[in-house]
Image (cartoon, helix red, strand yellow):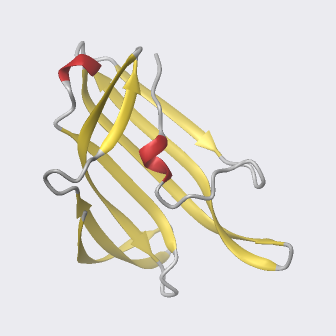
Amino acid sequence: MAIEPKGSARLRRELLTQYEFHSLDGSGGWRISYSGQAGTAAEEGWFLVDGNRLLRRVSVSALDIPENLKLIGLRATIDYATEVIAGRRVLLPNAARTHATDQSGDRHTSLSPFIIGVSLPLIRCWRFLTFER
């Protein structure tokens, strides 16, 4: 994975630092399941961190999606927030949005709010997203 700083960006009213990333040749990628088919795509995207270097948002897009998946576009964005649990501040996913476009041009969108105690506390959880029709 290659990561490069790209300046600053605003999220709501907060000024954050933006980084861009992309998978390197032969480094694996994003494992995608869709309509009963599976494959691995390269990935690129960006993420935002605050002044304390805490992740606030990550957005990843699939590149070179295998033809058997019948997708021409796939993007996932996850927002993160800090919460206090048992007196400690922890970073948890707050909301996720996925956008998929299939070969017929149909667009599919999924919005998922997270509930504390049920969410996946994984910074790289976009790798585990599964899309089923």
x, y percent for residue 88: 78, 79
Q: Is 57 located above or below residue 105 in the figure?
A: below
- The image quadrant of residue 84 is bottom right
* Extreme residue toward the bottom, this view: 51
Q: Measuring 24% from the left and 12% from the top, which residue is drawn there? A: 104
x, y percent for residue 127: 42, 46
Asked whether 117 or 14 is in front, the reply is: 117
Q: Measuring 34% from the left and 50% from the top, which residue is drawn there? A: 60
User: Is 48 left or right of 66, judged from the image as shown?
Assistant: right
Q: Is 22 located above or below residue 74 in the figure?
A: below
Q: How many numbered tags mark residues here?
A: 0
User: Is 133 left or right of 3, judged from the image as shown?
Assistant: right
User: Is 99 left or right of 101, judged from the image as shown?
Assistant: right
User: Is 83 left or right of 38, judged from the image as shown?
Assistant: right
Q: Measuring 47% from the left and 42% from the top, which residue is drawn there? A: 128
- The image quadrant of residue 76 is top left
x, y percent for residue 5: 25, 78
Asked whether 60 or 42 is in front, the reply is: 42
x, y percent for residue 1: 25, 63
- The image quadrant of residue 21 is bottom left
Q: Measuring 56% from the left and 58% from the top, which residue is drawn there? A: 122
* Extreme residue toward the right, this view: 86
